[in-house]
Amino acid sequence: MIRIPPRTRLRATQEAKAFLEGLKQEGVFRRSADGFALAAAFSMTLDEDVSSVSLARRADLVEADVLDNEVRLALEAGVHVLARRHGVAEPSKDSELVEEISRHAERGIQLLRTRWSGKTRAQIQDDIRKLVQPPTE
């Protein structure tokens, strides 16, 4: 399985970066990288089609090593699982892996922006808790 090199720069569009920075300023996240990772995981969980997500005009967000190793591993595994599920080639280079994670982050940010529109910080944080809790049986 391809891994993300720790010094790789994660990049986001200006719109996504501004949304993440706004969440950070509101105190929803301590770091924009946490929002980036949550958005990517959210999109992957929903099995969103990200083939049409553009990665043009992106700006540096953070280096990948600010994310915990377990978070990076989960995102990496998510890309590989989705590739197998859909019968498409798995990333063969770390740059392809980072691009796929970035596409999911961009799509996840679009979805979360809509989901959280008009919500307070407390409401957003409550929603995040619900999103990350394992389902109960």
Image (cartoon, grey):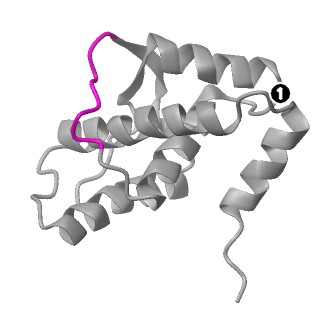
Quadrant holding the C terminus: bottom right
Task: State the image coordinates of residue 80 (x, y, percent, origin top left).
Answer: 26, 62
Quadrant of the rendered image containing residue 84 = bottom left
Q: Secondary structure at mark 1?
A: loop
Q: Which residue is mark 1?
A: 27
Q: Residue at x 72, y 67 (%)?
A: 133
Task: Tell me the quadrant of the picture where the N terminus can be found.
Answer: bottom left
Q: Between 88 and 9, which is closer to the camera in this rendering?
A: 88
Residue 26 coordinates in the image, percent (x, y): 82, 22
Residue 1's place in the image compared with 92, above or below, is below
Q: Is residue 60 magenta?
A: no
43 left or right, relative to 85: right
Give the residue at x 67% y 73%.
Answer: 134
For the point 30% across and 67% down, the residue is 81
Residue 117, position as x, y percentages in the image: 71, 29
Q: Amino acid at mark 1?
A: Gly
The stretch in magenta equals 50-57
> Is residue 2 left or right of 20 when viewed as pictured?
left
Task: Looking at this view, name the residue that lies furthest to the right.
Answer: 122
In the shown orientation, is residue 86 left or right of residue 29? left
57 up-or-down from 75: above or below: above
Q: Quadrant of residue 55?
A: top left
Q: Which residue sits at x=58%, y=45%? A: 38
Label 1 crowd bin: few (<14), some (14–19), many (20+), radius 10 Å: few
